[in-house]
Each structure stands twice: as structure tokens, then as C-alpha cells.
Image: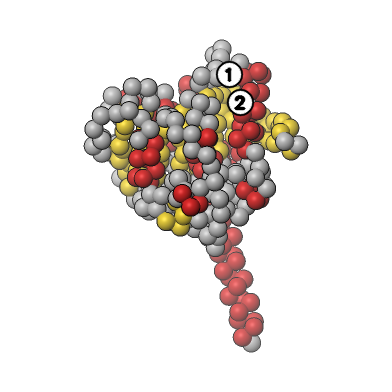
Amino acid sequence: MKKRIWLGSTFVLLVIALLAARSFLAPGVVRLPQLSGELQSLSLQHGGIERHYHLYKPAKLPPNPPLLLVFHGSMGSGESMREMSARQFDRLADEQGLLVVYPDGFDRHWNDCRASASYEANRQNIDDVGFVRQLITELIQRHGVDSEQVYGTGLSNGGHMVLRLALETPELLAGYAPIVANLPVDANLDCDKRGAPVNIALIEGTNDPVNPYDGGLVKLLWDESRGEVLSAAATAQYFAGLVVYGEGPEPFDLADTDASDSGYITAQLWYGKSHRVGLFTMQGGGHVLPSVDARFGILGGDIRDLDAADLIWAFLRAEPAAAGLPD
């Protein structure tokens, strides 16, 4: 009898965990935008492995367009990232005239900087940096992408991949925007810090149940293998320390346009002569990206005041007024 009870409890916990994972991968979406273009699923060979990516191309695209890379989180895919973000990056592409690419990680993960992570991309030391380099080169050749206007963002594990690129290849992208991802502590760091300044926007949630805003152990359901990370503030200070700027910025609030969500966004900006760093804190926000139309449920509070795509694009393109930021 005790064995049956134990098996029953284990089954219930497994169901709860699977439902939690499903919520993480496929949050609810209120509505999707009307889009002009189409999504193409493509592949290339890198390091003896067939790697896949998904390209959204607007119907009207200018010559030498900018490129935005959007990296998915753990257990995700490029297509799932597109859907869970309510296709807001595609809508941005239509409005601003850029290509958006959603790459697939290896075995649904990215080989980021967290040394202790147990997923296969990390265990096998997959060359994701090399894959991204080759992908950008291919997109330049095929679509005439402007190599000086390539940007990257990502959620969770995808955000950690963006952090790896910022640390190891600061010259590769014109701007980096990790979402709910803090730098690992030194004891858990498996990347080489080049120590070069970058344009970077960090988007973090104070109520994040996975990536702790104040630093500490990353927990994804039952998995604690990802180890410890710095606080959001310490992560921002690291990048700000690489930029020559004056006195530290005072925080300010972005417009709270939806009072029914879990909170609002505060910002701290460091502007140097050639680079800028932003820490955008989702006060009351969880392990989510800001989205007007996506609902993330169990992963903490939603922030629906604006779309992450608009905030990221305005900041990285040095057009702060477009996202409600001070000039």
C-alpha cells in the first residue's frame, strides 16, 4: 500500500512538473499581429552537425537590412520562442524593416557560460558561438544583411547565450539584450571575458522563480545543475564598468500602461561616448519577457505595459524616445 501511495505521489508530481514545463514553453497568447511576410525553416552544417534556424522576412525589406537574432530558452526551439513571444519580433520586423532569425539550440539548449549545467549542449561543449558566426555570415551573403547592424536577444538559456556572445565576441553584434539571465558567479563561469564594452540591455524580473534577481542558485523545476549567478545589479555593474561614463544613473519608471498586470518597469541607464548599458527591472515581474499579448502564468508576474521587442530595439538603436526613455 505504501508503495502504491508513493508511486501515486510521484506520478502527481511528475504531471505537475510536465504541466509547468508546458507552461514555460507555451504560455497563453491573447492575440497575434497581422504580418506581411512568411517564416522559412532553414539549416546549415556547422562542426559536422546540421543546425536549424527559422527566418522571418517581411514583404518589404530595404537593401542591407538589419538583423535581429532571437534565442529560445531551455527545452525550447526557435519556433516556440516565436510563438511564446506572441510574434512581437515579427511585428517589429514589419514595422522597422529588418530580418528576424530564431535559431534552434542543440538538443533544445544553448551552450552558455554556466559551467555546471547538465544539458547536452554544455556536456558536449557544442560550438554555439561558431554556429552563430557562420549563421550571420550566411545571412549576409544570402540577404545582404548589414554586418554593422546585427543584434541579439534571448530568453533564459537564450539570454545566457547572448551573455556568452557579449563576453567572448563583443565585436560580433552591434547590441545584446539578454532577458531574465544574470552572469554566472566566477566559480561557475565557463567563458572567457574579453573585457570589452558592448551596447547591452538587461531585462530582469524581481519575482523571477528561476533566475534569482538578487543572485543565487538557478532552479528550473527539479534541476539545480545550472549553478549560481550574480545579481541583476552586479551583472549590470560589470558591463557598466567597461563603459566610460560619468556618475551613476538615477532610476526612473517607464509608463505603467496596464494597471491590471503584475507591475511595471524601472530603468537605469549608463551612457558612455560610444556604448550604453541599460538595466530594465520588471518590478513584480517573473521569468518572463514583457509582452502586451503573452500570458506566462506560473513563471511569475506578467508585465504587459509594452513589448520587449520595442524596448530592446529602441535602446540598442539609440532611439530612447521610441520606448518612452529619456534622451
Left or right: 133 in relation to 185: right
Front-lying residue, 168 or 37: 168
Mark 1 crowd level (few <14, some 14–19, many ≥20, 10 Å Cα): many
Q: Quadrant of residue 138?
A: top right
On the image, the x and y values in percent for residue 2 come to: 61, 86
In space, the residues marked 2 and 1 are separated at their CA atoms by 8 Å
Amino acid marked by disc 1: Val
Amino acid marked by disc 2: Ile
Mark 2 crowd level (few <14, some 14–19, many ≥20, 10 Å Cα): many
Front-lying residue, 22 or 158: 158
Q: In the picture, which quadrant includes the C terminus? A: top left
Q: Residue shown at 65%/33% (left/top)?
A: 131
On the image, numbered disc 2 is attached to which residue? 136
The reply to whether the C-beta atoms of the residues labelled 2 and 1 are less than 8 Å apart is yes
Q: Residue shown at 66%/19% (left/top)?
A: 142
On the image, the x and y values in percent for residue 304 come to: 39, 42
Identify whether 6 is placed above or below 145. below
Q: Looking at the image, is mark 2 or mark 1 earlier in the sequence?
A: 2
Describe the element under mark 2 as helix, strand or loop: helix
Front-lying residue, 122 or 290: 122
On the image, the x and y values in percent for residue 105 come to: 63, 41
Describe the element under mark 1 as helix, strand or loop: loop
On the image, numbered disc 1 is attached to which residue? 145
Q: Quadrant of residue 65?
A: top right
* Residue at the outermost right position: 48
Front-lying residue, 125 or 159: 125
Q: In the picture, which quadrant includes the N terminus? A: bottom right
Q: Residue shown at 64%/82% (left/top)?
A: 4
Identify whether 45 is placed above or below 66. below
Q: Which of marks 2 and 1 is in front?
A: 2
Left or right: 125 in relation to 289: right
Asked if residue 298 can be seen in this view, the reply is no
